[in-house]
């Protein structure tokens, strides 16, 4: 008996996306079905190239066909991706950027820039097209972390505007205010000047097509944050904290800013950095020098996902200072922590895009 397309679709309706809680047929993930005897082929189009469940979903599709249609069927599943976005089609700024992720913290010193850099590297290693914008205007550290201290981006004039060409390293497009200023001198700028530089890098950067633009924001809740949400539609914010109470108090302020009715940018979740200390000579030991599970408990308290717990190890600092983020070292256990963080972030972005309305530029009335 000839296998039909309807049979295949009905069988695949029993395969759910674990994050979106709908079946792959309803979600439009099945394309290009072909049938030749008992050989069946189709595409499984996932919501992100960085999907951590791609192998599971592929196997679930094969099992659904063989268990519900023909146990001897040869099932060829081609896994591809089409990163979801809730950007409005009419958006003119950053037109090719599907998702904008702001990495924020309530205070300095919690490792936000380290997290941003390694998140970007991990996303790229999972197959995503990634950009990294260092918006920490007063303390840019991305040039050091990527070994680009002496690099200068190219610029061109286009229709009376200056267009900046991001540098590329480790598969990531990068812009930072640190590329344009003397690193030995302090930036003594009023808010409007700093905001103008951020706007220039955002709107004047030739970012091209990106699945994710990761923005390393300055600590606190000030002019730069308001400029960001008033300039481009932010997909979501990820909050970085350490477990100690003084950091959590400021993380609460960061959450409050993005969750407020005037701004209303979705919070993707919380990242607990320096969750414990593990010395190199005792890799199985954990010392909770900043307190235990403070970030985890706070995430549970306010009902947002815990995106990751990143340990404090010497290798993270050494790698950042050496211009090669630790996530590039696949043998490092910390690299696995950042990879897991990246997987959880993209899952939350996909869920956000499935459940929430298109992102809007924030209009704050004075």
Image (cartoon, rainbow, N blue to C red):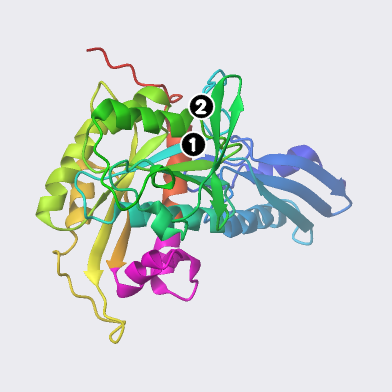
Whether residue 236 sits left or right of residue 27 in the image: it is left
Q: Which residue occupies 56% across, 17% down?
A: 90
Q: Residue 2, image x and y in percent?
A: 87, 46
Using the numbered discs, state the Cα–Cα distance from disc 1 to disc 2 in whole angstroms: 8 Å
| Span colored in magenta | 312-340
Q: Residue at x 44, y 46 (%)?
A: 179
Q: Are dots 1 and 2 in contact, CB under 8 Å?
A: yes
Frontmost residue, 311 versus 348: 311
Q: Which residue is mark 2?
A: 87
Q: Nearer the viewer, residue 357 or 110?
A: 110
- Location of residue 334 (image quadrant): bottom left
Image coords of residue 206 (percent x, y): 57, 35
Residue topped by disc 1: 99
Q: Is residue 195 a member of the stretch shown in magenta?
A: no
Expressed as whole percent of the image width and height from the top left, the position of residue 366 reads 22, 12
Disc number for residue 269: none
Sort mark 2 into few (<14), some (14-19) or many (20+) by Cα contacts within 10 Å.
many
The spot of residue 165 in percent (x, y) is 57, 39
């Amino acid at each position: 008996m000839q296998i039909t397309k309807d049979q295949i679709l009905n069988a695949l309706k029993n395969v759910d996306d674990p994050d979106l809680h709908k079946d792959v047929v309803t979600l439009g993930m099945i394309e290009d079905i072909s049938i030749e005897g008992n050989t069946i082929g189709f595409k499984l189009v996932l919501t992100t190239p960085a999907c951590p469940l791609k192998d599971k979903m592929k196997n679930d599709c094969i099992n659904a066909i063989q268990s519900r249609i023909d146990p001897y069927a040869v099932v060829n599943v081609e896994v591809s991706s089409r990163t979801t976005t809730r950007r409005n089609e009419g958006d003119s700024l950053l037109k090719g950027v599907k998702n904008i992720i702001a990495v924020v913290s309530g205070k300095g010193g919690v490792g936000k820039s380290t997290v941003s850099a390694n998140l970007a590297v991990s996303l790229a290693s999972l197959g995503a097209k990634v950009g990294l914008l260092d918006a920490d205007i007063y303390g840019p550290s991305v040039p050091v972390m990527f070994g680009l201290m002496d690099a200068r981006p190219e610029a061109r004039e286009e229709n009376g505007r200056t267009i900046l060409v991001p540098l590329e390293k480790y598969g990531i497009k990068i812009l930072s205010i640190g590329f344009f200023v003397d690193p030995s001198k302090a930036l003594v700028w009023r808010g409007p000047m700093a905001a103008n530089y951020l706007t220039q890098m955002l709107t004047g950067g030739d970012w091209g097509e990106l699945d994710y633009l990761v923005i390393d924001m300055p600590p606190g809740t000030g002019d730069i944050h308001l400029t960001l949400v008033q300039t481009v539609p932010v997909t979501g914010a990820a909050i970085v904290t350490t477990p100690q109470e003084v950091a959590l108090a400021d993380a609460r302020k960061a959450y409050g800013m993005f969750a407020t009715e005037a701004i209303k940018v979705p919070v993707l979740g919380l990242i607990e950095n320096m969750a414990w200390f593990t010395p190199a000579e005792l890799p199985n030991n954990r010392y909770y020098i900043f307190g235990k599970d403070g970030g985890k408990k706070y995430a549970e308290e306010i009902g947002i996902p815990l995106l990751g717990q990143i340990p404090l190890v010497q290798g993270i600092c050494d790698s950042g200072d050496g211009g090669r983020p630790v996530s590039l070292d696949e043998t490092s256990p910390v690299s696995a922590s950042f990879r897991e963080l990246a997987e959880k972030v993209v899952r939350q972005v996909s869920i956000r895009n499935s459940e929430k309305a298109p992102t809007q530029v924030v209009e704050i009335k004075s």
